[in-house]
Image (cartoon, rainbow, N blue to C red):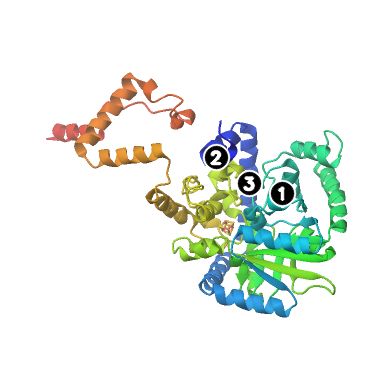
Amino acid sequence: MSSTATKDHAELAAIFNRDEPRVDWHDETLWWVRAKRDIAAHKLPEWELLRETASQIKNNVLSNLSTYLEQFEANAIKNGVTVHWAADAEEHNQIVHKLLSERGINRMVKSKSMLTEECHLNEFLAQRGFDVIDSDLGERIVQLAGEPPSHIVLPCIHKKKEEIGDIFHEHLGSAKGESDPKILTETARQHLREVFLTRRAALTGVNFAIAETGEFVICTNEGNADMGAHLAEIHIASMGMEKIIPERKHLGVFLRLLTRSATGQPITTYSSHFAKPQDGKEIHIVIVDNGRSIQLGREDFRNSLKCIRCGACMNTCPVYRKSGGHSYHTAVAGPIGSILAPNLDMKKYADLPFASTLCGSCSNVCPVKIDIHDQLYKWRQVIVKAGYTPTAKTIAMKGMAFTLASPTLYRAAGKMGRLTFKYAPFAVNNGANPWYKHREMPKAPEQSFGEWYAKRKEQKK
Ligand code: SF4
């Protein structure tokens, strides 16, 4: 059996689907979150105007990205912040490593940052003897479980509270069999309090970086980013280069959209602004490209960089809800992850744009109006042309194209198919046919539509 690292979305989804009750509550929970998002959105008569405004602001940012980045850098430096540029994940990790090493720090607290997941920072630092503790509750749970997050906003949505109780019992010493969320949260609180008080370095993500002022904003519901950053001597903020917004006044648009789209809340509990370091402390921002400028140059896919990581496209996606985040084998799962990942490695993530029904629900809920399902469809074409589809599929599609191009061959194939269904159904209805695993195969018709039509025409003469 191949390792999970070599399995594609369908194979990993099949693993998730072995536990049917889990699939059901995963599906229902995310749909509940989606419904909360709908209620929150419908309460604002100006919702569509907000989406359109956010989309236009981000279009402007993408068209003038280098200008806004340089403006942000200049203002951040004026504020006393140190700005670093990282071309890729490796350089980002090296910068963080150097900042810690130079200060003799080997323990760091980290708040939720999908960029550091994308860069595999935790593994990078762990291999070099550094201790990194994730302070977002969901992230800490998956970190203790030795798993990556399965959702960008709800990292441990795939875990039952009883499983979390077992993890806490093993790692944090809670009572065996304890699964009361309040008690488990208190256990995590006590554990993390000690971490916050003893770490000299804190790393956070960045939700929005304001070019006009050089400040950046981090949104959390737990206040963990603030706690880590305010107590540590050095605050490192890892920022994807698309996180820029031009002016502070634009924040109102995005903050109103972000949490309503994510969880149905009117606003994140903490939307914290960081502008300048406190006396005797340091703030470093690492601005990361890691394939973003390549995506910016792909006309059909550039506006995926408008994403504000609200997770709404995941919550609404029927494939995500039924297959779980880990089946996407990339840091950002779901519909948006399936657009972003092939940009980083088209061969490795060739399966992901096919993990969609193309129903368009993702595009309908996206607060910044990314044409997600259109891009998924476009990626399929790019991937097929580049020759990254599995050999069996490539051969089958070529055979199908050949057959459909010839009416005689098409009719003969249809007849053969009907006869096979009738006299040798086992040739189709067997375990080697993935469609048969979950579907009743249809009864074969006696004749083709063409034959039926010709007969009717004859009878009517
Ligand atoms: S693509 Fe849109 S809906 Fe999906 S996470 Fe990004 S902003 Fe949210």
Which residue is more in the foreground, 250 or 460? 250
Quadrant where ligand 1 appears: bottom right
- Find residue 246 and report its horizontal and vertical position in percent: 61, 75
The tag earlier along the polypeptide, 1 or 3, is 3
Q: Image check: 453 left or right of 135?
A: left
- Find residue 170 and report its horizontal and vertical position in percent: 81, 37
386 versus 409 height, above or below: below
- Find residue 396 and report its horizontal and vertical position in percent: 35, 37
Q: Image check: 404 left or right of 150?
A: left
Q: Residue at x 53, y 75 (%)?
A: 64
Q: How many numbered discs sit on the rendered protein?
A: 3
Spatial CA span between label 2 and label 3: 27 Å
Spatial CA span between label 1 and label 2: 22 Å
Which residue is more in the foreground, 335 or 122? 122
Q: Is residue 57 visible?
A: yes
Q: In terms of secondary structure, where does tag 3 sit?
A: helix
Circle 2 or circle 3, nearest the eye: 2
Amino acid type for the residue under numbered disc 2: Thr
Which residue is more in the foreground, 345 or 111? 345
Q: Is mark 3 within 8 Å of ligand 1?
A: no
Amino acid type for the residue under numbered disc 1: Gln
Identify the disc placed on residue 30: 3
Circle 1 or circle 2, nearest the eye: 1
Amino acid type for the residue under numbered disc 3: Leu
Which residue is more in the foreground, 461 or 121? 121
Residue bearing the label numbered 1: 127
Q: Is residue 269 visible?
A: no
